[in-house]
Image (cartoon, rainbow, N blue to C red):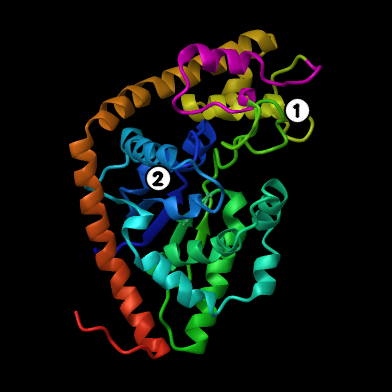
Amino acid sequence: MENKKVIFSGVQPTGKITIGNYLGAIKNWTTMQEEFNSIFCVVDLHSITVNQVPAELRKNTFDLLALYIACGLDPQKSILFVQSHVPAHTELAWVLNTVTMVGEMNRMTQFKDKCRKHADNINMGLMDYPVLMAADILLYQTDLVPVGIDQKQHVELARDVAQRFNNKYSPTFVVPECYTPKVGAKIMSLQEPTAKMSKSDENENAVVTMLDDKDTIMRKFKRAVTDSDTVVRFDAENKPGVSNLLSIYSCFTGKSIAEAEVEFEGKGYGDFKTKVAEAVIEGVSPIQAEQQRIVKDKAYLEEVLKDGAYRASKLAYKTLDKVYRKVGFIPRVR
Ligand code: TRP
């Protein structure tokens, strides 16, 4: 690889990808891939920590890979691959487990949230999720991890684990940093704008997905929660709903929040919501068309998967071999 910084990120192939995932993650990655050695993963191993329907998981994995490409991630410029195709992820996770303390896992906020949400299925994988994520990151000697703030604690854990391993054995891993983009890092629920827009939200109206049709998008924005005020002004604390809509509008049009505020001066919320919906429809329509074209081209996707796994494996096993040597395993004859 050339002498550029390495970025690694991943999305779970669960449910539909929201405009929040797009704006907060995938869209930014498309510009980053020009500047960095970029690796983007569909993290299917992570997704089975909560119950999945196997056939749906398979479909969602293809859908997400096609969506990555439709959004502009280029398999020539970046490494795009599916996590389960590179066994080094689980292999490294095992070793990292031995430098991770149960106590620190118990403190992970997402783990605690998920235990509450999936009380009937608190499995070891759910608890180990952050360690597998650390393995994802550390395998590629990643410098920067572009993720939303909700993933910050997980990246911190990856740093801690890397440092601990480096100290216990000898310098092996690059200690990664969280890379949170300035805009669009956090898109909120349309129904409860103080909570993050989450693809697992049970209220359909709260979430706009990248594959929603035009009418659905319009309907969801028309029903978006605002406030009893009438002014379109950004104030995340006192006007979370309106502020969220302004953020979405700004992200999809490229206009600044200030420009948008001027544009909607004296306009009612009805008009404003329609305009936001139109901007979103205009933004997602070409991506949807491209995603549908790609997902039908299974031969192409198979080729992308094969090439991605091959390129990722080469890098991953370089690190894993080093790790195995340091911990005292007998070198494997290849
Ligand atoms: N936990 C991340 C999420 O839910 C997904 C993920 C898995 C990830 N492995 C990763 C993100 C490695 C960045 C780097 O959003």
Q: Separation of disc 2 and disc 1 at Cα?
A: 29 Å
Whether residue 217 is in magenta: the answer is yes
Which numbered dot is residue 29? Answer: 2
Q: From the image, which quarter does the N terminus lie in? A: bottom left
- Residue at 60% x, 50% y is 149
Residue type pointed to by label 1? Lys
Q: Position of residue 131 (x, y in %)?
A: 53, 66
Q: Nearer the viewer, residue 243 or 325?
A: 325
Secondary element at tag 1: loop
Secondary element at tag 2: helix
Residue 243 seen by the camera:
yes
The quadrant holding residue 124 is: bottom right
Question: How crowded is the residue under tag 2: few (<14 C-alpha within 10 Å), some, or many (20+)?
Answer: many
Q: Position of residue 133 (x, y in %)?
A: 49, 61
Mark closest to the chain's N terminus, 2 or 1: 2
**Residue at label 1?**
239
